[in-house]
């Protein structure tokens, strides 16, 4: 036991005293390691966030598609009769215009015939 004790004291005496000083190279190595770990964590976090957002967006696509379809159906239900009515009224006004032109032509002919009757008695 004495031998171990003496050898321990001898090794402690021979050992070069160590000071807990960090050199600039050591600090640079520590910074690089910390930066690498932080970058890994940030990229992992971004990846998880993107996957979560993609899942949420995909889950919203179906209800939004149904709402858009419902909106289009409502617009069609309201718009179709209005479009048909507008087309009918437009066709009717064109028909009225042609009838007015015919009436005007016939009125002129009647006036011309009356003029001829007055001149010929």
Image: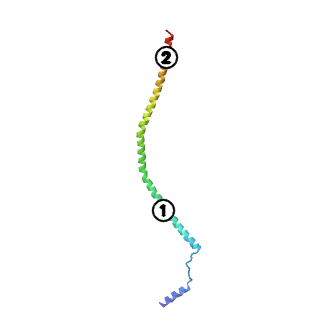
State the residue at coordinates (42%, 40%): 76
Say whether residue 35 is left or right of residue 69.
right
Is the image coloured rainbow, by chain, by secondary structure, or in one colour?
rainbow
Between 103 and 25, the residue placed more toward the observer is 103
Tell which circle, 1 or 2, labels the residue nearer the N-terminal end: 1
Q: How many marks?
A: 2
| Relative to 30, residue 77 above or below | above
Examine the rendered structure and indicate whether residue 3 appears above or below residue 102.
Answer: below
The crowding category of the residue bearing disc 1, from other C-alpha atoms within 10 Å (few below 14, some 14 to 19, many at least 20), is few
Farthest-out residue, right: 24
Residue at image position (51%, 66%) is 38
Q: Is there a contact, CB below 8 Å, between mark 1 and mark 2?
A: no
Residue 10 x/y as whole percent: 53, 87
Q: Quadrant of residue 25?
A: bottom right
| Image x and y of residue 83, in percent | 44, 36
| Image coords of residue 5 (percent x, y) | 49, 88
Residue positioned most to the bottom: 2
| Most distant residue in the top direction | 121
Q: Which residue is labeled 2 in the image?
A: 111
Q: Which residue is mark 1?
A: 45
Element class at badge 2: helix
- Nearer to us of marks 1 and 2 is 2
Q: Nearer the viewer, residue 50 or 110?
A: 110
Horizontal arrangement in the rendering, residue 28 relative to residue 83 (left or right): right
Task: Please tell me the numbered disc located at residue 82.
Answer: none
Q: Nearer the viewer, residue 110 or 29?
A: 110
Above/below status of 79 relative to 100: below
């Amino acid at each position: 036991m004495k031998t171990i004790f003496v050898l321990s004291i001898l090794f402690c005496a021979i050992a070069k005293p160590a000071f807990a000083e960090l050199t600039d190279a050591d600090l640079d190595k520590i910074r690089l390691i910390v930066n690498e770990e932080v970058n890994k964590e940030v990229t992992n976090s971004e990846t998880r966030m993107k996957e979560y957002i993609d899942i949420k967006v995909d889950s919203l696509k179906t209800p939004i598609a149904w709402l858009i379809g419902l909106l289009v159906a409502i617009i069609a239900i309201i718009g179709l009769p209005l479009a048909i009515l507008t087309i009918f009224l437009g066709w009717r006004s064109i028909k009225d215009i042609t009838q007015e032109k015919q009436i005007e032509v016939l009125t002129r002919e009647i006036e011309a015939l009356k003029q001829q009757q007055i001149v010929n008695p």
